[in-house]
Image (cartoon, rainbow, N blue to C red):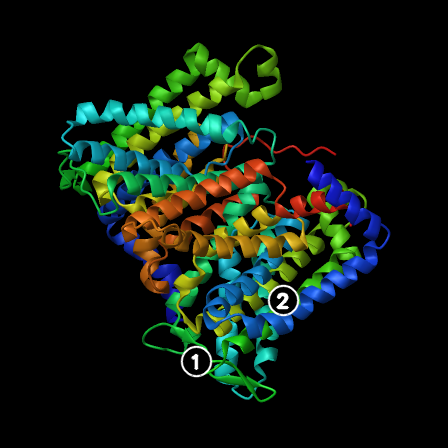
Amino acid sequence: MTVLTYITDLYNTFFATRSRAINTVFVTVISLLALFAVPTLANEYWLQAILIPFLIFALAALGLNLLTGFAGQLSLGTGGFMAVGAYSAFKMTTAWPELDIIAVFLISGFFAAGVGILFGLPSLRIKGFYLAVATLAAQFFLIWLFNRVPWFYNDNPSGTITAPPRTFAGVMITGPEAAAEVRYLVALVLLAVFVFFSWNLMRSRFGRAWMAVRDMDVAAEIVGIPLLRTKLLAFGVSSYLCGVAGALFVFLYLGSAETIAFDVNISFLVLFMIIVGGLGSITGSIIGAAFITILPIFLTNLNPILGIDLAVDLAKHIEVIIFGGLIIVILILEPHGMARLIQVSRERLRI
Amino acid sequence: MEFLWDFFVAPFLDMIEYPVFLGEVAISGLLTGVMYSLVALGFVLIFKASQVFNFAQGAMVLFAALTLVGLMEHGLPVWGALPVTALIMVGLAFVIERGMLRPLINQPPITLFMATIGLTFLLEGAGEWAWGSNVKALDLGIPNSPVDVGGMLLNEFDMIAALVAAVLVAVLALLFQHTPMGRALRAVADDPQAALSLGISLRTIWIIVWSVAGIVAIVAGIMWGAKSGVQFSLSLIALKALPVLILGGLTSVPGAIVGGLIIGLGEKVAEVYWGPVIGGAIENWFAYMLAMLVLMFRPQGLFGEKIIERV
């Protein structure tokens, strides 16, 4: 304890009054590291198995957090909205191969936004857990639709959608030939843009209206916030981000996918991310995504590291048990998510 | 044009032309609905008493069925394995209350909901770890054969399952209406603060409802397990019970029953008459759409308490 106090004091003597400058320095250092150091230092496995899915899930978690954490509408349809993004990106890039692939990603989000707004319509009457279950309708219906209608996967007999090779500014960024570093950078830049966008959006009129609706929608309506428009905008923006994440999920990470890649487990996984990370916190979405992406990989590799030799299925079951147990433990230790932990430690360090 | 005919007219003509077949479809739908109700019932009990949306109910069904079958495989007869399983479920209720509910007291509902999803993983992993993950048959000696009832062919097993469910609901209703424990339980559901101040222990009530939900899970596990084998997919019937739950209302036991019947009937009729027209396998989402439609008119479900919003 005394050591911690000492370090804190020492830190504060140097940095107490420079919080803004520190923030800027911090963000710059992280960005530079992420942009230049990580792609050169990380190997193929790290990029492909950990960093790329992390960035994509962070984007999806950000999308869900805008809806659930900021606007207070509990949604379990994330997987479905991601699927809309993925399938519309696939349809667009196969129909118009000359269309810029980054533009395809960005436009595919609008399809997801449209579908999201449609399934957000009941939110005006249905609330809380009733709404959560109702959004599962979107999840199951959309997955069924993409499975049943061959038009969506271009009548491919295997029923999969595959990311075709596409270039941006002369560099191959999708398809089997694309380098992991390039895909990582594309995902990173897109995530950064959307994080910046969300940060500003939350300080705008719309973001504040969302938070008012979250805290008590009847009161928000009385002070003049149009409920329908506000809620539908939240569904739209949230589904847009989830849709882009879904497109990236197939094009930058999986390479090819069936609808099962977007099943209801994905919805729960993304919800886990924002709860563990912190509801109503943009940083929290990213931390939560990192944690939930890395945890299973860590658990899988735990036994070999510790030198325990277990049968494969036994190890798998123990992994599931530990994952479930850890979720409960984290919720008990810090119900407001990891973002809260960071906030508390920042206050202690007075950064 | 042909599609419109197939969609809006042909199914009804079929129904009128073969009323016996319609009766068969309807009754088998209702009987399946009863099975959904069995799962939804566990949800309702827990939600009423502790405001916890227990997603783990499906995993509890799987866990109970796995434990029962596992014990029977180790040589225990059914009448020996049943009480042991019941004891394990009650023990589980104790552990859940102590390890999860008590530390999470006064947290927002969504946090508790997520905790129960964590519990789902925990139970699925633990059940399969302890008893293995291969499909097990659960033979109760009930013939799974069609019998002739007034000209309609109905499945005998489904009818017995419906009977069991009816008995279970009747017992629960008696328990809740006519025992001191039941009164305490309803008091907690009505107003936890007032119940506390009258000396009713919330913790005891929680342990009781989670135990009862565990016992209901055993019954559901036996019925579903005997129908489709005890395997991992039993856990997924939670997803079948969710639309039943919101259709009937999260806080209503009769709602769970009526909701189950409506969903079972609607799903079966839609699958048989409209499924082929729009491509089949619609049972995954039809129940949800139906529930959503009803909620548009009654946001609290058919039998749920009216949601009153105050500022």
Image position, residue B274 (x, y; %): 35, 58
A275 in relation to B158, above or below: below
Asked if labels 2 and 1 touch by Cβ distance under 8 angstroms, the answer is: no
Q: Residues within 10 Å of mark 2 (few under 14, many from 20)?
A: many
Please state which amino acid type lies under the numbered disc 1: Pro
Task: Please give left or right for residue A276 compared with residue B9 in the image.
Answer: right
Question: Residue placed farthest to the right in the image?
Answer: A17
Please state which amino acid type lies under the numbered disc 2: Leu
Judged from the image, the secondary structure of the residue bearing numbered disc 1 is: loop
Q: Residues within 10 Å of mark 1 (few under 14, many from 20)?
A: some
Residue under pointer 2: A191
Q: Residue at x 68, y 64 (%)?
A: A30
Image position, residue B91 (x, y; %): 36, 24
Image position, residue A149 (x, y; %): 40, 70
B186 in relation to A261, above or below: above
Looking at the image, is mark 1 or mark 2 earlier in the sequence? Answer: 1
Residue under pointer 1: A176
Q: Residue at x 56, y 10 (%)?
A: B199
Q: Residue at x 44, y 43 (%)?
A: A324
Judged from the image, the secondary structure of the residue bearing numbered disc 2 is: helix
Image position, residue A32 (x, y; %): 68, 70
Chain containing mark 2: A
Q: Which of the two residues, A257 or B142, is positioned nearer the viewer here?
A: A257
Same chain under badges 1 and 2? The reply is yes
